[in-house]
Amino acid sequence: MTKKSSNVILTMLAYISKRGYYLLFLVLLACQPQTPISNGANGEKVTQNSKNDSFVTNKHNNTAKIAPKTKNKPTNSQNMPTIADTVNYLFSEKTIVRQLTMRGMIDVQTVLPNVKVDLRYSTTNNFVGTDLYGDLDQCYLHPIAVKKLQLAQKILSDSCVSCQLLLFDCARPLSVQKKLWQKVVGTPQQHYVAPPSRHSLHNYGMAVDITIFDESTQKMLDMGTKYDFLGSLAKPKYESKFLKNGQLTIQQVKNRYLLRSIMQQAGFRAIPNEWWHFDAVSLQQAKKQFSVLP
Ligand SMILES: [Zn+2]
């Protein structure tokens, strides 16, 4: 038997068998070539997206294009899954998605197919530089939040025909909140993340991190900072100060007003520290009436 055919049989067995897969993975690990990592043309770090063989750049700016995401079975250049991809495919995606759907969360794009999703914690393009979601790259939300988001998109479309909501983060299981906390605890970034013990409304599928994407320009509206910018410039409570001293332009502030206006009309609450974050209910209400996502 050739090495290639042996790989095929072992991989098939790994997919269909619920037992003994650890041994098979170890054998595959010994046989598989590693996924390449290279540098982009402009010196940007470019990594292979293990979910779909597409590529995502680590370019942090307001005009970065969204990498297309499709849910294909992960394979490498020899059309064989790497060990890491196989583990992700069998466990991470199924486990997180199953947990979310079992608890009644809804994939927003099944209801709002034109809404854009760029789940940053499912990539390395986030402030901790780590993929925390594995193969979860859909936006799941509680039905109450989905209904409000439908209204927000309708209000937005009424005032800007070419505009779509773009979601950076949605339901975030508590297990991921713990991973995120471990990344920042004891660092200056610590006060930007809710401790797992306190819960975030993302942990109930009741919060969104969101902006506006204009199809006519193929760009996000300029909000004055990138998403997850750690600093005062991202805080709505200081907007008038930064407008006066020229650190924010009138157009950037108008864009933030537009986002806040449509979200608040749809029933979301803005917060004073992040222009992109909106809550569908209060934390007290969520703790009283709903279950945290484990
Ligand atoms: Zn948020």
Image: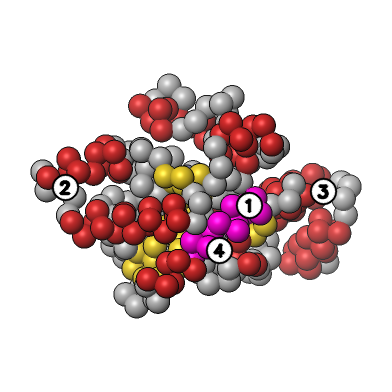
Label 4 or label 1, whichever comes before in sequence order: 1
Q: Amino acid at mark 3?
A: Tyr
Instruction: Say if mark 4 contacts mark 1, CB within 8 Å.
Output: no
Q: Amino acid at mark 1?
A: Ile
Instruction: Say if mark 3 contacts mark 2, CB within 8 Å.
Output: no
- Quadrant of the rendering where the C terminus is positioned: top right
Circle count: 4
Quadrant hosting residue 216: bottom left
Q: Which mark is residue 109?
A: none
Q: Regarding mark 2 in the picture, which secondary structure is present there? A: helix
Q: Regarding mark 4 in the picture, which secondary structure is present there? A: helix
Please name which of the two marks, 1 or 3, marks the residue nearer to the observer: 1
Instruction: Say if mark 2 contacts mark 1, CB within 8 Å.
Output: no
Label 3 or label 2, whichever comes before in sequence order: 3
Whether disc 1's CB lies below 8 Å from ligand 1 is answered: no
Real-space Cα distance between discs 1 and 3?
39 Å
- Quadrant of the rendering where the N terminus is positioned: bottom right
- Give the image location of residue 257, x and y in percent: 31, 55
Asked if one can make out residue 270 in the rendered structure from this viewpoint, the answer is: yes
| Residue at (67% x, 32% y) in the render | 288
> To which residue does mark 4 refer?
150
Disc 4 packing (10 Å; few <14; some 14–19; many ≥20) = some
Q: Regarding mark 1 in the picture, which secondary structure is present there? A: helix
> To which residue does mark 1 refer?
144
Taking the image as shown, residue 214 lies to the left or right of residue 101, namely left
> To which residue does mark 3 refer?
21
Q: Amino acid at mark 4?
A: Gln
